[in-house]
């Protein structure tokens, strides 16, 4: 199982979109500063996620989400497409 996820920086409220095979480990990596693009905004919390059978499927959805530039559009997309944890988005 592969996951597309959205994490939120607790102070700046920035979102970061990614995909992984292990959600817990990936969040830990973000919070340990092991990702250059998220390191300046630590700490992060998991907002929502969705599972896919293949990495290819997850990567397609990740690309779609990253193409949505407005926060409200991103939040609508994850609600409409049944991401888990979506009640926390926004």
Image (cartoon, rainbow, N blue to C red):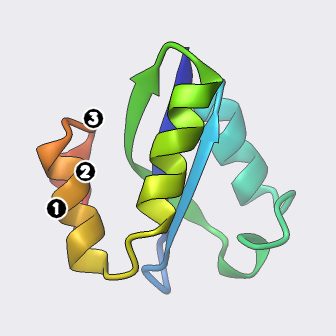
Dividing the picture into quarters, in which one does residue 51 lie? top left
Q: Residue at x 74, y 81 (%)?
A: 40
Verify CB contact (< 8 Å) between mark 3 and mark 2: no
In the image, residue 90 sits, relative to residue 87, either above or below, namely below
Q: Nearer the viewer, mark 3 or mark 1?
A: 1
Q: How many marks?
A: 3
Q: CA distance from mark 3 to mark 2?
A: 9 Å
Describe the element under mark 1 as helix, strand or loop: helix
Q: Residue at x 53, y 54 (%)?
A: 63
Q: CA distance from mark 1 to mark 2?
A: 6 Å
Describe the element under mark 2 as helix, strand or loop: helix
Relative side of 16 to 69, left or right:
right
Q: Nearer the viewer, residue 9 or 55?
A: 55
Q: Position of residue 19 (x, y in %)?
A: 60, 41
Q: Position of residue 47 (x, y in %)?
A: 37, 53
Q: Mark 1 — residue?
A: 76
Q: Nearer the viewer, mark 3 or mark 2?
A: 2
Q: Mark 2 — residue?
A: 78
Crowd class of label 2 (few under 14; some 14 to 19; many from 20; radius 10 Å): many
Of the two numbered discs 3 and 1 on the same chain, state the one appearing first in sequence. Answer: 1
Of the two numbered discs 3 and 2 on the same chain, state the one appearing first in sequence. Answer: 2
Q: Residue at x 47, y 73 (%)?
A: 10
Q: Mark 3 — residue?
A: 84
Q: Position of residue 23 (x, y in %)?
A: 58, 32
Q: Quadrant of the C terminus?
A: bottom left
Verify CB contact (< 8 Å) between mark 1 and mark 2: yes
């Amino acid at each position: 199982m592969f996951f597309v996820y959205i994490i939120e920086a607790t102070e700046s409220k920035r979102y970061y979109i990614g995909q992984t095979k292990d959600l817990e480990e990936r969040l830990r990596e973000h919070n340990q500063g092991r990702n250059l693009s998220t390191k300046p905004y630590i700490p992060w919390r998991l907002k929502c996620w969705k599972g896919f059978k293949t990495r290819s499927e997850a990567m397609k959805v990740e690309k779609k989400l990253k193409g949505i530039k407005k926060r409200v559009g991103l939040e609508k997309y994850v609600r409409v497409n049944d991401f888990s944890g979506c009640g926390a988005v926004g």
